[in-house]
Image (cartoon, coloured by chain):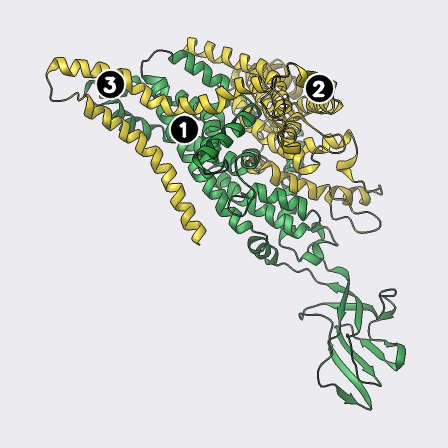
C-alpha cells in the first residue's frame, strides 16, 4: 500500500511537471508580450514576437528529447565504435575487424537474415490469407479479433507461452508440452525442440509470426475493403476464378499496403531481442544481432566499442527502409 | 462485399474450416497457458493441460505422524489416519512401504513389514499401521499411487503475487507505464500542432526528420544513453537508474510515432476552424487547448493505447535503465528472472505470465476500436 501511494505521488509529479511547463511557459509569454488592450503598434510588435517564440515553446521539449535520446546517440554510437571497451581510447577500425572476423557475428548475421526472410513473409502472407477469408464469413470479425489478440502480449510473455508448448520431458514421463504430446500421439520421438541447431530458429520465429500476423491481417483487411467492386465484378463476368481474382485483381491493387506491412515487420524483426533472450539466450546457434549487442553491453563489465559496432550494423540494415519512408512521406506531402 | 458472387460456392465450407483451424492455432497457446495457471501444481507437472478435466494418476508419499498417546488394540500398538491431507474424491490404487517398491500392494490388502508390523491402506486413503512395540523415532513412510480428480485452484496466483514478488512488480510496471504514456502525448500533441499549423523556419526538415527517426533502431541509443545516464546520475547523486530516467527514455522513443500520427491527424483538421479562431483573437495556446485537443481525441486515444502496450510490454529499456531490485523490477523483467530461476516450475511461470499479459489483454479487448484506427492511420498512408 505504501508503495502504491509513493508510486502515485511520483507519477503525478512527473505528469504535472510536464503539464506545468506547457501551461506556464505559454502564460509567461502572454504576460510578457500582451496582445490585448494595448496600442495597435505594440500589439502588432508583440504579436510578431509571440508568433516567433511560441512554435519553439510548443516543439522545444520534443526537439530536446529527440535530440538527446535519438539523434545524438546515433553519432555517439558511431564515435564509440572507434574507441576501446571503456570508450576512452581511440583504436581505429579494430572493433570492425574484430566483428568481421568473429564467427559469433556471422552466426547472428546469418540468423538475422533468416528471420528477415521468414518472419515478414510468413506474417504478411498469413495475414493476407486470413484477411481475405474472414471477409467472406459471418463470424469473420470474431475470428479476426482472436487472431489479432497476440499483438497485445509482450514478447517475453509470448516466450513463456511457447516455451511451455515446446517443453520436453525425457524418458517415459508424460509430455506436458503440446508439441511433443502431438508428436508422441502420432508415434514420433519427443524432442528438445529449441536445442536442435538451425531448426530451432524456426521455432523461435513461430512466436513472432504468431504475434505479427494479426497486425498484417488488420491492415491488409482494411486495404482489401478499399478495392473497388467494379474491378472484381468485371473479372467475374470475364470468367476469372477465385484464385485468379485474388492474385491478378486484388493483390496488385493493395501492393502498396503489402509493402508497408512488410517493411514494418522487417524493422521489428531487425530489433528482435526479447524472444531470443528468453528462449535460448543465443545458445544452440540461435544468436541474433540485437541480443548479441545487449550481451556485449554488459558482458564482463561491458564493451561499449563492440556493442556500438553491432548497433551500427543494425542501423545500416535499416537505412534503406528509412530512405524509402522519407521519400514516400515527401511525395505524399507534395501531393497534398 | 467483394465476394458476394462467390459466397455460395462449395469453397465456402473450406473457408469456414480453414479459418476455424487458424483461429484455434492462434488461441490455443494462450488458452493452454491460462488453463495451466489455474491447475493444481502437482497435476500440472505430470499431465498436459488438455487433460485438465480428467483424473490424473500420481505417485505420492506421506509420512505417518506418531501421536503422543499411542493406542493399544488387541495387544498391538495402532495408528489410524488418512494418506490424503485434504478430503476429496481421491482413490488409492496401490501402495508400498519402501521407495524401491512403491506399488507393491493393491489397496485394501495387508502388507507385512519387518519386526511384525503391518500396514493396510484402503482405496479411500484410510490407513492402519500396527506394531507389537510402541512406535518411536520418525514415522513410517507410505508410498501410494492415487487417482486424483481434476483440481483447479488460485493458489498459483496467490503464490506468485506474494512470495514471488509479482504484486510489487505490478505496481512498478504501473509506475513506469502511466507517466511514460501521458508525457509523450502531451509533448507530441504540442509538437504536432506546431508542425502542422504554425510557421517557423526548418519545419519541413523537422517533419522529414521525424519520419526518418520512426525507424532508427533503439539499439543505436542504448550505449550512449547508458553512459550519459551514468554521468548525470553521478552528478546529481541519484544513481543512473531512476523512474524519471526511464520515463524520459520511453517518452523520447515513443515521440516519433506520436508526432507522426498526431501531425497527420491535426494537419487534416479543417483549416477554417483554426483560421476563424485566429481572427477572433484567440492565442495559439487557446486554439490548441480549446479546439485542437478535443478534436484530436481519437488520434490521442490511439496513440496512448500503442504507447501503453509498448511500455508495459517492454523488456529491453527496463533492463537497461532500471535496476533489478524489488523497488524497480517491472513485470517483464520479473518474468524473465523467473524464467531463469524457476525454469521448470510451470505453475509459477504460467501464473506469472498470465498476470503480465492480463492488463494489455484487457486494454486491447476493451479499446480495440481505437487501436485498429490508429494502426490504419499509422501504416496505410
Out of B101 and B88, give the one closest to the viewer.
B101
Q: Which quadrant holds residue B21?
A: top right
Chain that bears disc 2: A
**Chain A: what color?**
yellow
Total of numbered circles in the picture? 3
Q: Which quadrant holds residue B120?
A: bottom right
Left or right, residue B352 beside residue A288: left
Out of B254 and A12, give the one closest to the viewer.
A12
Identify the residue at image location x=85%, y=43%: A187
Q: Looking at the image, is A313 positioned above or below residue B173?
A: above
- Mark 3 to mark 2 CA distance (whole Å): 54 Å
**Chain B: what color?**
green
Res B299 label: 1
Q: Residues within 10 Å of mark 3 (few under 14, many from 20)?
A: some
Q: Residues within 10 Å of mark 1 (few under 14, many from 20)?
A: many
Q: Is residue B258 visible?
A: yes
Q: Looking at the image, is B371 positioned above or below residue B71?
A: above
Res A22 label: none
Chain that bears disc 3: A
Q: Residue furthest bottom?
A: B74
Chain that bears disc 1: B
**Do tags 3 and 1 sit on the same chain?**
no
Left or right, residue B37 beside residue B330: right
Identify the residue at image location x=74%, y=80%: B80
Q: Which residue is mark 3?
A: A50
Residue B205: percent from the left, percent from the top? Answer: 42, 12
Out of A183 and B357, give the one closest to the viewer.
B357
Left or right, residue A32 beside residue B366: left
Mark 3 or 2: in front is 2
Left or right, residue A116 beside residue B248: right
Label 1: which secondary element? helix
Mark 3 vs mark 2: which is more N-terminal? 3
Amino acid at each position: 500500500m505504501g508503495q502504491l501511494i509513493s508510486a502515485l505521488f511520483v507519477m503525478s509529479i512527473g505528469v504535472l511537471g510536464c503539464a506545468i511547463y506547457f501551461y506556464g511557459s505559454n502564460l509567461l509569454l502572454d504576460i510578457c508580450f500582451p496582445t490585448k488592450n494595448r496600442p495597435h503598434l505594440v500589439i502588432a510588435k508583440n504579436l510578431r514576437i509571440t508568433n516567433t517564440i511560441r512554435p519553439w515553446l510548443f516543439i522545444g521539449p520534443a526537439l530536446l528529447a529527440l535530440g538527446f535520446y535519438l539523434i545524438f546517440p546515433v553519432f555517439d554510437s558511431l564515435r564509440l565504435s572507434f574507441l576501446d571497451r571503456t570508450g576512452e581510447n581511440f583504436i581505429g577500425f579494430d572493433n570492425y575487424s574484430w566483428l568481421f572476423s568473429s564467427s559469433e557475428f556471422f552466426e547472428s548475421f546469418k540468423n538475422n537474415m533468416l528471420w528477415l526472410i521468414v518472419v515478414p513473409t510468413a506474417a504478411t502472407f498469413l495475414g493476407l490469407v486470413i484477411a481475405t477469408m474472414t471477409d467472406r464469413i459471418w463470424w469473420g470479425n470474431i475470428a479476426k479479433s482472436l487472431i489479432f489478440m497476440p499483438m497485445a502480449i509482450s514478447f517475453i510473455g509470448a516466450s513463456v507461452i511457447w516455451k511451455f508448448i515446446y517443453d520436453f520431458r525425457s524418458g517415459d514421463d508424460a509430455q506436458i508440452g503440446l508439441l511433443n504430446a502431438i508428436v508422441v500421439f502420432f508415434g514420433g520421438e519427443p524432442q528438445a525442440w529449441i536445442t536442435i541447431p538451425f531448426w530451432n530458429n524456426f521455432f523461435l520465429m513461430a512466436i513472432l509470426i504468431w504475434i505479427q500476423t494479426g497486425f498484417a491481417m488488420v491492415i491488409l483487411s482494411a486495404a482489401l475493403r478499399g478495392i473497388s467492386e467494379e474491378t472484381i465484378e468485371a473479372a467475374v463476368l470475364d470468367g476469372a476464378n477465385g484464385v485468379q481474382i485474388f492474385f491478378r485483381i486484388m493483390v496488385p491493387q493493395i501492393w502498396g499496403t503489402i509493402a508497408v506491412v512488410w517493411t514494418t515487420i522487417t524493422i521489428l524483426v531487425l530489433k528482435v531481442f526479447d524472444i531470443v533472450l528468453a528462449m535460448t539466450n543465443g545458445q544452440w546457434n540461435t544468436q541474433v544481432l540485437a541480443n548479441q549487442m545487449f550481451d556485449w553491453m554488459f558482458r564482463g563489465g561491458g564493451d561499449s566499442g563492440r556493442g556500438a559496432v553491432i548497433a551500427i550494423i543494425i542501423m545500416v540494415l535499416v537505412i534503406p527502409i528509412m530512405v524509402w519512408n522519407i521519400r514516400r512521406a515527401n511525395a505524399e506531402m507534395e501531393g497534398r | 462485399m467483394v465476394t458476394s458472387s462467390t459466397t455460395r460456392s462449395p469453397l465456402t465450407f473450406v473457408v469456414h474450416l480453414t479459418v476455424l483451424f487458424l483461429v484455434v492455432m492462434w488461441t490455443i497457446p494462450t488458452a493452454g497457458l491460462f488453463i495451466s495457471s489455474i491447475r493444481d501444481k502437482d497435476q500440472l507437472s505430470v499431465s498436459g493441460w488438455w487433460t485438465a478435466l480428467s483424473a490424473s494418476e500420481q505417485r505420492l508419499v506421506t509420512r505417518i505422524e506418531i501421536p503422543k498417546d499411542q493406542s493399544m488394540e488387541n495387544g498391538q500398538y495402532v495408528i489410524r489416519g488418512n494418506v490424503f491431507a485434504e478430503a476429496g474424491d481421491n482413490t488409492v490404487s496401490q501402495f508400498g512401504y519402501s521407495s524401491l517398491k512403491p506399488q507393491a500392494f493393491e489397496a485394501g490388502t495387508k502388507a507385512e513389514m519387518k519386526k511384525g508390523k503391518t500396514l493396510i491402506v484402503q482405496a479411500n486413503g484410510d490407513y492402519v499401521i500396527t506394531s507389537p512395540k510402541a512406535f518411536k523415532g520418525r514415522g513410517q513412510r507410505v508410498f501410494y499411487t492415487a487417482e486424483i480428480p481434476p483440481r483447479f485452484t488460485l493458489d498459483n496466483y496467490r503464490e506468485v503475487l506474494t512470495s514471488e514478488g509479482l504484486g510489487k512488480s505490478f505496481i512498478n510496471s504501473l509506475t513506469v507505464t502511466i507517466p511514460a504514456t501521458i508525457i509523450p502525448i502531451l509533448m507530441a500533441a504540442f509538437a504536432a500542432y506546431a508542425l502542422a499549423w504554425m510557421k517557423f523556419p526548418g519545419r519541413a526538415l523537422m517533419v522529414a526528420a521525424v519520419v526518418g527517426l520512426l525507424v532508427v533502431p533503439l539499439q543505436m541509443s542504448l550505449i550512449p544513453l547508458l553512459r550519459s545516464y551514468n554521468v548525470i546520475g553521478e552528478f546529481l547523486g541519484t544513481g543512473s537508474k531512476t523512474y524519471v530516467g526511464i520515463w524520459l527514455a520511453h517518452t523520447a522513443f515513443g515521440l516519433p510515432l506520436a508526432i507522426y500520427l498526431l501531425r497527420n491527424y491535426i494537419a487534416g483538421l479543417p483549416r477554417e476552424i483554426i483560421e476563424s479562431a485566429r481572427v477572433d483573437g484567440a492565442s495559439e495556446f487557446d486554439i490548441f487547448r480549446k479546439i485542437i485537443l478535443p478534436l484530436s481525441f481519437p488520434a490521442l486515444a490511439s496513440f496512448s493505447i500503442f504507447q501503453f502496450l509498448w511500455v508495459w510490454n517492454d523488456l529491453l529499456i527496463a533492463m537497461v535503465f532500471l535496476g533489478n531490485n524489488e523497488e524497480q523490477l517491472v513485470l517483464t523483467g520479473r518474468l524473465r528472472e523467473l524464467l531463469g530461476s524457476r525454469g521448470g516450475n510451470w505453475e509459477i511461470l504460467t501464473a506469472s505470465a498470465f498476470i503480465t499479459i492480463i492488463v494489455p489483454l484487457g486494454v486491447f479487448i476493451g479499446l480495440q476500436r481505437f487501436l485498429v484506427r490508429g494502426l490504419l492511420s499509422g501504416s496505410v498512408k
